[in-house]
Amino acid sequence: MSNILVTGATGFTGGHLARRLAADGHTVRALVRNPEQAEHLAAAGVAPVPGDLQDPSSLRRAAQGVDTVYHIAALFRPGNATRQELHAVNTQGVQNMLDAAETAGVSRFVHCSTIGVHGSVKNPPADETAPFSPGDDYQNTKLAGEQIAQKYMRENRLPISIFRPAGIYGPGDTRFLKLIGPVKRGRFVMIGSGQTLFHMVYIDDLVNGIILCGTRPKAVGQVFILAGPEIVTLNQLVQIIAKTVDGKPPRLRVPFAPVYWAGFVCEMLCKPIGIQPPLFRRRVDFFRKHRAFSIEKARNMLGYNPQVGLSEGIARTAQWYKEEGLI
């Protein structure tokens, strides 16, 4: 059994990972800014340790005696976050955590990037060598953070593995509610043709893949895409959701271009006065950008084998939403 540090454990992915590692018998620490907000982790056998990605001394203390670091923490597109705030966590925070891990002499370091560094996939399915094309400040700062980790790999300063997860969903996450909720209520509007390719990963499959990145010797020095077993069009995804939650497929379809430019206008009006736009281009791009990926490298090198298909995963997620009174 190992001594493990997980950053981002108060979030969705990091929380699932930390609890799974503790359940497997490892000694798990969770880096948290406010230990009072981590009582649920302590109840699962995870030890909260105070620290902040912008405080290098706290990271050095947290990493002492650790065998493996899983760096999951990130600042994920809060509406009013500035580019500087995103950079401080998603880029400089990576540098700080890597420095602390190197000082502590950890045996493995696993870094969470994002599939968003590839932007819209031009020739799907994309693999790990596809061109980078980040589309916003979040993706740009995540790419910069990954590139710092890759520099450490090239210099052999740490045994590092990097993974780029596809769209993550499952019980405990509410981001997918933005799609399930409108479909359930019969209010989902399809922008464009609906033929955009879409690729997701269920949280349990992702956690399995992350652990493989931190335990398989072949993972060291490599980058892996971690996604689910199915690629579907947006039309197909909405049909699966509608069938699962007894919802209705979209009756209204609108052309892409006018909605995109409406998002542009909203951004121009809202951002200077510090409020989140009701409509913005990144959200509209959801309907246009292909997100379809190959997981063959992870299959072949790690034995990664995602088990949860979309129908089953959406059913589990929708059931949790119902239990929580969200739909």
Image (spheres, grey):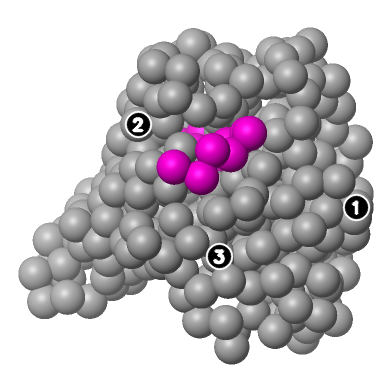
Which residue carries the number 3 mark? 31
Residue 187 locus on image (x, y percent):
60, 68
Q: State the CA–CA distance, disc 3 to disc 1.
A: 19 Å
- Give 123 or 9, whichever is nearer the viewer: 9
Which residue carries the number 1 mark? 24
Instruction: Provide the residue span drawn in magenta.
Output: 103-116
Residue 212 visible somewhere in the drawing: yes
Residue 65 among those drawn in magenta = no
Q: State the CA–CA distance, disc 2 to disc 3.
A: 21 Å
Please give the name of the residue rendered at 81% of the width and 25% of the height, measured from the top-left corner: 304
- Give 205 or 280, whichever is nearer the viewer: 205
The quarter of the picture where residue 64 lies is: bottom right
Please give the name of the residue rendered at 46% of the width and 69% of the height, measured from the top-left corner: 51
The type of residue carrying mark 1 is: Asp
Q: Are marks 3 and 1 in contact (CB under 8 Å)?
A: no
| Circle nearer the N terminus (3, 1) | 1
Q: Is residue 198 above or below residue 172?
A: above
Bin the neighbour count of mark 2 within 10 Å (Cα to Cα): few under 14, some 14-19, many 20 and up: some
| Circle nearer the N terminus (2, 1) | 1
Q: In the drawing, what numbered circle is on residue 103?
A: none
Q: Is residue 319 left or right of residue 211?
A: right
Which residue carries the number 2 mark? 148
Bin the neighbour count of mark 1 within 10 Å (Cα to Cα): few under 14, some 14-19, many 20 and up: few
- Give 218 or 276, whichever is nearer the viewer: 218
